[in-house]
Image (spheres, rainbow, N blue to C red):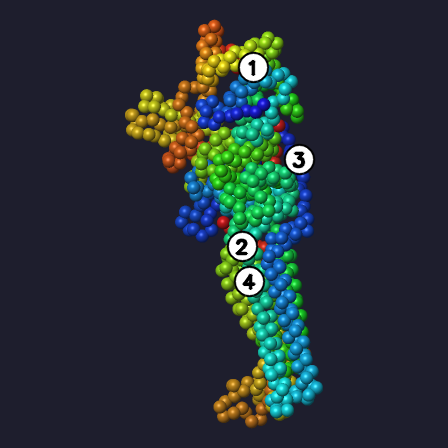
Amino acid sequence: MTGRRTAVEALGLGIRHPRRANDPHLLADCSFRVPTGAVCGVVGPNGAGKSLLLSAAAGLVRPTEGRLTVLGQPSDSETMLADIAHVDQERSLYRQLKVAELLDSGRSLNARWDRARAQELLDLGRVPLTARAGTLSGGQRTLVRLALAHATTPRLLLLDEPLADLDPFVRRAVMGLLLADVADGDCTVLLSSHVLADLDEAADHLLLIDAGRVRLAGQTTELLAAHRYLGPADRMPDSAEPVELHGSASHGTALVRITDGPARPGDEYDHPTLEELVIAYVRSPRADSWLAPSMRPMPRTGLIAEPIA
Amino acid sequence: MSTATPRMVPIRLRPPRPRPPRIPHRALVRTAVRQHRTVLAAAAICLAALSAWALRTAATTAAVQTDLDRTGCRGRVFTDACSSLADPVGQALQTTQQVQFALLAVPVLVGALLGAPLLAREYEHGTHRLAWTQSVPRRRWLTSHLIVLGGAATTIGAVAALLGTRIHAAATPALAYGASGFDALPYNAFGPVLAAATLLAFALGVLTGSLIRRTVPAIGITILGHAGLTVLLTWLRRWLQPQLTRFPPHGYDLSPDDWLLWDGVLTSDGHRLPYAQCPESGCPADSRTLDVYHSAGQLWPMQWTQGALMVALAAALLAAAYRSIRRNRL
Amino acid sequence: MEYRLRRGSSMPAYQQIVQQTEQALRLGLLRPGDKLPTARHVVAATAINPNTVLRAYQELQRAGLVESRQGLGTFVVRSLGRAETIAGSGLREELDAWVDRAAELGLDREDVLALAGAAVDARLPQQAEPELPR
């Protein structure tokens, strides 16, 4: 279960393009917290900065502003490497090496290595161990990268579009294997996708990034409960923040955010689906961003300490 | 009115996580060898072929030298009595020069094919993202690759240097009068300078690859850079050993193995004047002839000094490569 | 026990797990002392979020049907319905024979289900659903 321990935390995180002078920010002023044990979907339009955020969390790109903490250490620290695994969008592999050799390299380069865990994933795609990586199909390359990541029993798994080129027959099985560790606790998964359906039932937290900024973050249940549609007949409560308006003020509907007082389960309001919510925020760039309490950064203390539960 | 006292919150300090086991260097090196095995195998084959060619040429040249001495034809090859030796001598000279040209190419090839691709290929194929997210910090990763490819470059450079020295020794005392070890061609193709040049070109390639991040441009710039460095150092080397001066009583009398830097006159008022700067009417009558030169005995000290300089430069370039991978650009 | 979860169903995934567990208890497929599949196992098989499984198990625990034992797993502590009564009564065997006879007479699956449903509706009219205390 997710709790108060933190896997990834960003405070005012910004990453600037090294050369672009006007509008240099690829990520700007991102603050959020992913609790340990979460399966957090990172969503947003193409080019929003999802991959960059995952690369930064993997220590591949150093923040130019603010702070990014991964498993309690700065994201560019070397000691956290043993506990993370990253699958990048290009699924880069040493093309001249055979799959078996890649696995052997993985064993040599990692503090923990469980060959059987890699094999489970490779079997799903019938990836031959004797094939050279350069001859594999896109889906098979994905499986090899996922296998290399899975075998290290990471405490933080960073997956960039993990299902994008897997065929539908293996998607669920792959996802099941990757998420199973979370059930045992102490493992956190961040996975990006621009297809929300991929995250269906898999993610329990959502981080929406658009144009390099965090637009929406929180537990999915929390996000859904905090938003509702209001019809023309409904009175707009004072505390409601409009997100998106459809039609005219007198005849249209509005998607609003009401965060004072918990929504009662089974209330009669018309709540949006997660997909509707994400689309509404992306379509309304001027609507205020919102961090739900579960993903707000922790107040700073001098010590790395946690309250006794 | 009571002032707010800070509320005591019980906290539990998390025990420090045990440090992950350090990954042994041997495993890293083994992985790097596997990754580079194709280029390493190709390099070994090329080096073997070059060695065979160079050693055979050296043997042939030595045999020609023996024939010259046996028949007393040294220095008289173009007389009728020695005409049968003219062809073998010409042949030996030509092949020796070809081998020396090939040796000159060794640093270029090492820099372009071992050095430049080391990081450029990783960036180009995106495999750095795979390599640098394993448990091994990227600087240790680079070290293991430098051990493998840099070790190969050093070996190749050392073997080439020995071959160059062997073939240079076989060709001197000069077959052709006037050939000196200081001439740019043999000088850069043997001894410590050739070994160090190989290492320097490798380091230059590594750094270029880490900055350019694409293989083919990195190779091109490495080749150009190496050529530039070679020209620069070849020009610079004259200051690496003290320049000697002599006042020959009867004009030029240096041995063929010496290197005349410039000659001129010492005027009666103590000025050194190269011949080119003498007035058109001629140099002052009461001046002494002057040769400024490096003696043959300074050849090896100069080679070692220049070699050390190049190794230091190579170390600096590699340090810069380490720095460049620490900065994570996009 | 394997859960079959339907995506896109209006029923949330955790409720599907609760419902299928209850049904298994009702049919006697799960009995007191049986162990529910680990959350890890359910996640690997269905690719749903682990916290969803844990939430369903908590729901079942709150209903007093299962109990989580530290480090061992989640165990059934109470059955639902009349599993024991059904087992000794021969009802199931009689029903099997009846279905076989219907099939022999040429009725297909839908016919049989409709007939059985009609009989149940006629003799046991709908009342307040015997749901779990919430």
Residue A229 pos. (x, y %): 38, 25
- Residue carrying label 1: C26
Q: Residue at x 68, y 84 (%)?
A: B67
Residue at 60%, 73% (x, y): give it.
B99
Amino acid type shown at disc 2: Arg
- Asked which quadrant contains residue C69, the reply is top right
Expressed as whole percent of the image width and height from the top left, the position of residue C84 reads 61, 11
Residues at marks 4 and 2, CA–CA distance in whole angstroms: 12 Å
Dot 1 falls on a residue whose secondary structure is helix
Badge 1: few (under 14), some or many (20 or more) residues near its Cα, within 10 Å? Answer: some
Query: Along the polypeptide, which appears first: circle 4 or circle 2?
Result: 4
Work out which quarter of the rendered image holds the C terminus of chain A and state it. Answer: top right
Q: Which residue is mark 2?
A: B121
Say yes or no: labels 4 and 1 on the same chain: no
Q: Quadrant of residue B178?
A: bottom right
The chain identifier of the residue carrying mark 2 reads: B
- To which residue does mark 3 refer? B15
Q: In the image, is residue A54 above or below residue A262?
A: below
Q: Position of residue A206 (x, y in %)?
A: 48, 33
Which of the numbered marks, if any, corresponds to residue B112?
4
Q: Secondary structure at mark 2?
A: helix
Residue drawn where x is 47% and y is 51% of the image: A18
Front tag of 1 and 2: 1
Establish whether labels 3 and 4 are both on one chain.
yes
Q: Who is closer to the viewer here, A167 or B222?
A: A167
Disc 2 from disc 3: Cα separation: 41 Å
Q: Residues within 10 Å of mark 2 (few under 14, many from 20)?
A: some
Earlier along the polypeptide chain: callout 3 or callout 4? 3
Q: Residue at x 64, y 57 (%)?
A: B148
